[in-house]
Image: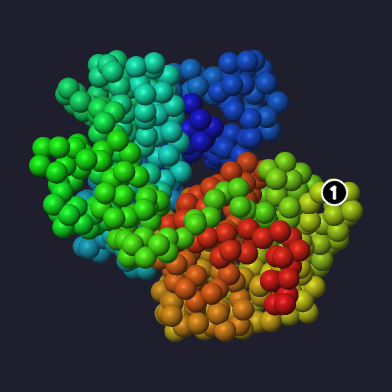
Amino acid sequence: MQNVEVARIFEDLADLLELDGANPFRVRAYRNAARTVEALSADVAAMVTHDPAELLQLEGIGKDLSDKIVVIVQTGQLPQLEDLKAKIPPGVVQMLRIPGLGPKKVAALFKDLGLETLEALKQAAEEGRIAELKGFGKKTEQSILEGLAIVAEAGQRVFLADAKVEADAIVADLQQLSSITQATVAGSCRRRKETVGDLDVLVTSSDHNAAMDRLAANPLVVKVLARGDTKQRVRLRSGLELDLRVVPDESFGAASQYFTGSKEHNIVIRRRAQERGLKLNEYGLFRGDESVASRTEEEVYAAVGLPWIPPELRENRGEIERAEAGQLPKLIELADIRGDLHMHTTATDGMNSIREMAEAAKARGLQYIAITDHSKRVTMANGLDAERLRAHWKAIDKVRGEVSGIEILKGIECDILEDATMDLPDDVLSEADWVLAVLHYGLKQPREQIDKRLLNAIRNPHVDAIGHLTGRLVNQRPGADLTFEDVLKAAADHGTWLEINAHPSRLDLDDIHAAAAKDRGIPIVINTDAHSTAGFDVMQYGIFQARRAGLEAKDVANARPFAQFQKLLCGS
């Protein structure tokens, strides 16, 4: 049981309690508990095993919450949550996935209009009944219809971050069997796509039944859906379904290549095999009935005249041609990152102090960071006005003098306001070491206004980079409508950098536009947007996104040592 899973159960409980009309203080207690557990650097399951009393030392965790954590870790569920799920229809819970539709509004739709499914919600919106409900109106009704389309498009796909945790745990558990000699995740999870619809795991084993029995007994598995001689399908606690395939050692490479995909990539690889008089499938690469290359992916690619291609690039977006020309990039790795330039502290909505964030970054081997708390427009996060920001920078200066071994930049995440001005005046921004300009509000403005806002920020001499360019939230909210060509050209012309925000719910820039930025020579920064010391852990997802974009270490500004980073930042 991972921390994120425990946190998710508390978040789900808070949502359902709010739908049920529970005491707001009780709801808040569960949300705070979720936040505490998710931000915890220690393993909460290990704490339960070692000494459950340790849980009482966590902020906001009393006896009742501590007992619930123990139950969750030991059983994988919480009876109180299961009782609420039985009471509230699943379709009502699904409504919470609609952007901008929180528990209070969903409760009103459920209780006042009796809506229990997404289909019923859509029909009510189309008939105009929702606009008549107190606290809603035509605008909210239209937003619900737009949100339903987003939910339908997202389907059952989950964040890569959630899917990878489960897939890695299952592979690690299968590897405990002595009869299993090789095991790997395949599919979109191995290609590190932003979201994953299902999971594929391949193993080679001398005992097919032992491998399948091991998977069926895994605590992450709630149901075995099908089982054959070499394939088993199960449903996981998260709702994802997973296919386990047991293949011979001599077919492992071909099976890995085949089941990793993508479909478009594999079509080209199979065509190349056919041009050479070969047949490629999940069992191997054959000339007639003779297997010629099947044990490793490297053998398979070599047989069709190519070097091995990293899974993240296998989307048929030019990787075949680059491989054939010997021009595959040396993709960036997590170990290349030297700095992190987007994070928050207790000055706004972060959970840790400046010193704690600096020490945690240093412990991870980072050479430099930028503290970038929110500007005043983000009132819900206690954003900083000029006076508070300058006091905050003085506090950063103090920590700078006390923490050695890491450079701490005085930064700000400054909102680009709806009228295309910056949230703080230029004389304040000029005092910063690092200015990250962002869109948080007004994301539905017309393209012309969004472009104006971004272009004004890019041209501002005090803005160093644009953070999470589109403002999208994966599976929840589309990004702002903007003219990418104009924005990228302006960024290249004015020397303004662009961020890949590594948080799994953002991953913004996406891989397509990060690749386009690289082609224009725009430096990329990969940042965590950490709101706690545990938040640094998401850096890997930004790296995955960068790898899908074909980025090398040289394309990423914060993969440089501090002296070189400063030189690039100063334009010299």
Colour option used: rainbow
* Left or right of 287, for residue 213: right
The image quarter containing residue 553 is bottom right
Q: List x then y, in percent, for residue 108.
A: 37, 49
The residue shown at (79%, 56%) is 407
Q: Is residue 77 above or below residue 29?
A: above
Residue 424 drawn above or below residue 501: below
Nearer to the camera, 457 or 558:
558
Amino acid carrying label 1: it is: Ser
Which of the pair 417/263 is nearer the observer?
Answer: 263
Q: Which residue position holds label 1?
A: 404
The residue under the point 29% across, 55% down is 305
Q: Position of residue 360 (x, y in %)?
A: 72, 43
Q: Examine the rendering and report whether any part of residue 145 can be seen.
A: yes
Q: Quadrant of the C terminus?
A: bottom right
Task: Give percent across and percent down for residue 54.
Answer: 67, 21
Q: Quadrant of residue 428?
A: bottom right
Q: Please state if 416 lies on the left or on the right of 354 as rendered.
A: left
Would you place residue 127 above or below residue 430 in this image? above
* Callout count: 1
Element carrying mark 1: loop
Q: Is residue 187 visible?
A: no
Q: Residue at x 33, y 62 (%)?
A: 324
Residue that lies at the very extreme toward the left in this rendered image: 288
Q: Residue at x 59, y 21 (%)?
A: 46
Q: Nearer the viewer, residue 30 or 137?
A: 30
Q: Nearer the viewer, residue 566 or 483?
A: 566
* Other-residue count near label 1 (Cα within 10 Å), few / some / many at <14 / 14–19 / ≥20: few
Q: With respect to residue 357, does 496 lie above or below?
A: below
Q: Position of residue 385 (x, y in %)?
A: 74, 67
